[in-house]
Each structure stands twice: as C-alpha cells, then as structure tokens.
Image (tube, grey):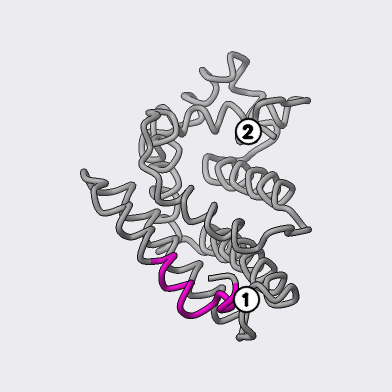
Amino acid sequence: MSIDPFATVSGTREEILAATYRALCDHGYADLTLSVIGDELEKSQSLIYHHYDGKDELVLSCLEYMLDYLESTLDETVDDPRETLEQTIERVCTPVDSDPEQSVRRVFIELRAQAAHDAAYREHFTRSDRVFRDWLQSVIEAGIDSGTFVDCESGRVAEVLCVTLQGIFFRRTTVTTTAWLPETSDELVATLEHTLYAPESA
C-alpha cells in the first residue's frame, strides 16, 4: 500500500486537499496561503472558497483526511506482535535520506506547534495520538494473548511507547545529527526485551 495518502484522488475536495498537502510540504505552514494552494491546484482560487472558509479549516481537513488514511492502513490483525513493534521502532529511528519525506516530517512538527494555542489543532492531535496509542495497545494485547509478551497493563506500556516514539520523531526532525538514532533504537528494543517480552521470546 502506498504511504502517500494522496497517491490517488477523486473529486474536487480530494484534489484541494492534495494541493494543500503539496503546498505545505513545499512552503511550510507559515508561508501557506490560499493563493499558494490555488497555484498548486492549478484551478480557480474561488473553487477553494466554495468548499472552505479559510486556511486553517483547509489544513485541518487535510490532517483529518490523512489521519483517516493512516487508520485504514493499520493492521487490525497482528501476526507477529514483537516484529510489529520492532519494525515500528525501526521506521521511527531510521535516518531519512529523502528530502520530500523530511519535508513531510517538518510540516507535522510545524502544525503540531499550532496546537499550543489553537483548540482545533489540539483536538486533532489529541485524536491522532489516541489512534497511535490505541494501535500500540492492540499490538501489545495481541502479544500478551499469544504468550509473546508478559502480562502487563497494556494501556500504560502503550502510552510510554507512544510518548517515547514521538519524542524521537520530534528530535530527529529538529536537530542536525542522527548519530544518536541507532543507539536509541537498540536501547529501546533492549528495554522491551527486559520488561515486555516473555523470557522464551526475548
């Protein structure tokens, strides 16, 4: 499955959201205007106003669309809970070589900062965190049920993992060095081996 939520779009609304996504990646939130989005859309700017009242309503709709897409890609059935957790850690801790991917990461950091003073963004990122945390909890519970993980309070473990992975994501996006990533990944997996993995699977 493509990691691009706008790899295929249908209808005017999705075209506008895709243009917003591209404009955000190219210009960032601070320099984003409806005019810039209109240029990316290559259609009349009035078409945007027909569907959205302003920049933030459009950006939030774009974020909601992307979150819905993410939810649709998360596996409901986990065949190998340990591998799933470690692959997730690896994805977060692997240095990014692609400029477009780094641009996407920067945009998410920039947009999340809006939540500090904007309730609508705060609501979105509260939901976004809940989706990721709940998925992590479902993976942990699958591991407990299969005997791969020790019995534990899955919600608390998922919360700690969620916060830790977010911290790694934020730091790697906002500093110039990635030399610390491999050691961080190794230590996180080692912690899981000592605290979460059942002895026979560690």
Horizontal relation, residue 125 to residue 175: left or right: right
Which residue is at a point 40% across and 51% down the rendered structure image?
93
Mark 2 lies on residue: 17
Q: Residue furthest front?
A: 200
Q: Residues within 10 Å of mark 2 (few under 14, many from 20)?
A: many
Residue 70 sits above or below residue 102 on the image: below
Q: What's the residue type where badge 2 is placed?
A: Leu
**Residue 144 versus residue 52 in the image, above or below:** below
Numbered circles on residues, count: 2
Residue receiving disc 1: 149
Cα distance in 3D space between marks 1 and 2: 41 Å
Where residue 150 sits: x, y (%)? Answer: 61, 82
Marks 1 and 2 close (CB-CB < 8 Å): no
Whether residue 152 sits left or right of residue 184 in the image: it is right
Task: Examine the rendered structure and indicate whether residue 107 appears above or below residue 148.
Answer: above
What residue is drawn where x is 58% and y is 59%? 124
Q: Residue at x 53, y 71 (%)?
A: 202
Q: Main secondary structure of the magenta part?
A: helix
Of the residues shown, which amino acid type is indicated by label 1?
Phe
Q: Residue furthest top?
A: 42
Mark 1 secondary-structure assignment? loop
Stretch in magenta: 188-200
Q: Quadrant of residue 100?
A: top left
